[in-house]
């Protein structure tokens, strides 16, 4: 793989798939917009201060999306968390071992096998086919090929497509793209994400469902 094709963003896995890369580019643009606005309101700030200030905005924005948009929809509860009051320096910011080994992995079953594409034409959003004529981008065919996909279809088309499709059910079933074709031909032996999750749980002492 030619490293010149890869985007350099905060997450080392950002080039893994088109959806992840598109979302990362949106956050990158949001960061730069915040930095541009802060330069006006804080003209004496250094580049480092502007970077860190914009970084805090991006982190807060992502936390808001996860905690107050995604989580209520996932749990089907209007307000599952108490209202944020203030920063508490005495609360550890890390995550628990059981969350990292088990709870953090539940969205694996929600990943769909394909990504829809949607484009704006004359004020309307219409679905479009990928260059091969298929109605969606297959995940297993685009591992670590996100750079070419984003340049071919644009971030807008990918994000509009993702926002227009329904996730898989949160259950014990994981699509073949994650079980039999994970990371595609760049790996000598393709990986099974379900098996990796089970082994991760065993390594971290997570009990079985029947225990």
Image (spheres, rainbow, N blue to C red):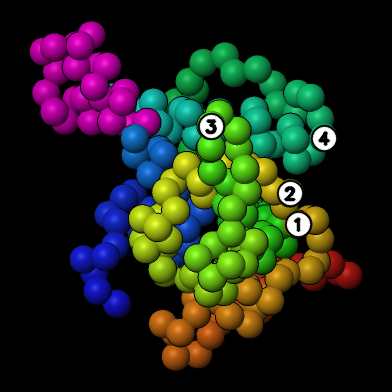
- SS at badge 1: loop
Q: Calculate the distance from the C-alpha at mark 2 to the C-alpha at mark 1.
A: 7 Å
- Magenta span of residues: 30-51
Q: Which residue is mark 1?
A: 168
Q: Split into 4 quadrants, where in the image is the N terminus?
A: bottom left
Q: Calculate the distance from the C-alpha at mark 2 to the C-alpha at mark 3.
A: 25 Å
Foreground mark, 2 or 3, reads 3
Q: Is residue 209 left or right of residue 27?
A: right
Q: Residue 170, how many percent across, how many down? A: 78, 55
Verify whether residue 82 appears in magenta: no
Q: Residue 75, how many percent across, how many down? A: 79, 38
- Give the mark nearer the N terminus: 2 vs 3: 3
Position of 148 relative to 22 (above/below): below
Q: Is residue 54 left or right of residue 88?
A: left
Q: Which residue is mark 4?
A: 76
Verify whether residue 38 appears in magenta: yes
- Give the mark nearer the N terminus: 1 vs 3: 3
Q: Which residue is mark 3?
A: 122
Q: Is residue 11 left or right of residue 66?
A: left
Residue 44 shows up from this direction: yes
Foreground mark, 2 or 1, reads 2
């Amino acid at each position: 793989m030619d490293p010149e094709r890869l985007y350099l963003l905060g997450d080392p896995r950002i080039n893994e798939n088109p959806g992840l890369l598109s979302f990362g580019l949106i956050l990158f643009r949001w960061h730069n917009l915040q930095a541009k606005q802060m330069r006006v309101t804080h003209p004496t700030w250094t580049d480092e201060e502007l970077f860190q200030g914009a970084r805090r905005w991006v982190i807060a924005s992502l936390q808001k999306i996860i905690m107050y948009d995604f989580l209520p929809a996932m749990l089907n509860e209007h307000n599952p968390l108490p209202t944020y009051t203030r920063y508490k320096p005495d609360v550890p910011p890390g995550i628990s071992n059981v969350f990292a080994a088990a709870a953090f992995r539940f969205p694996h079953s929600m990943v769909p096998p394909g990504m829809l594409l949607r484009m704006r034409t004359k004020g309307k959003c219409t679905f479009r086919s990928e260059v091969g004529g298929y109605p969606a981008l297959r995940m297993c065919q685009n591992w670590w090929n996100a750079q070419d996909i984003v340049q071919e279809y644009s971030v807008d088309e990918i994000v509009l497509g993702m926002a227009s499709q329904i996730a898989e059910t949160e259950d014990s079933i994981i699509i073949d793209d994650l079980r039999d074709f994970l990371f595609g031909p760049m790996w000598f032996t393709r990986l099974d994400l379900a098996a990796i999750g089970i082994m991760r749980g065993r390594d971290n002492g997570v009990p079985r469902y029947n225990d």
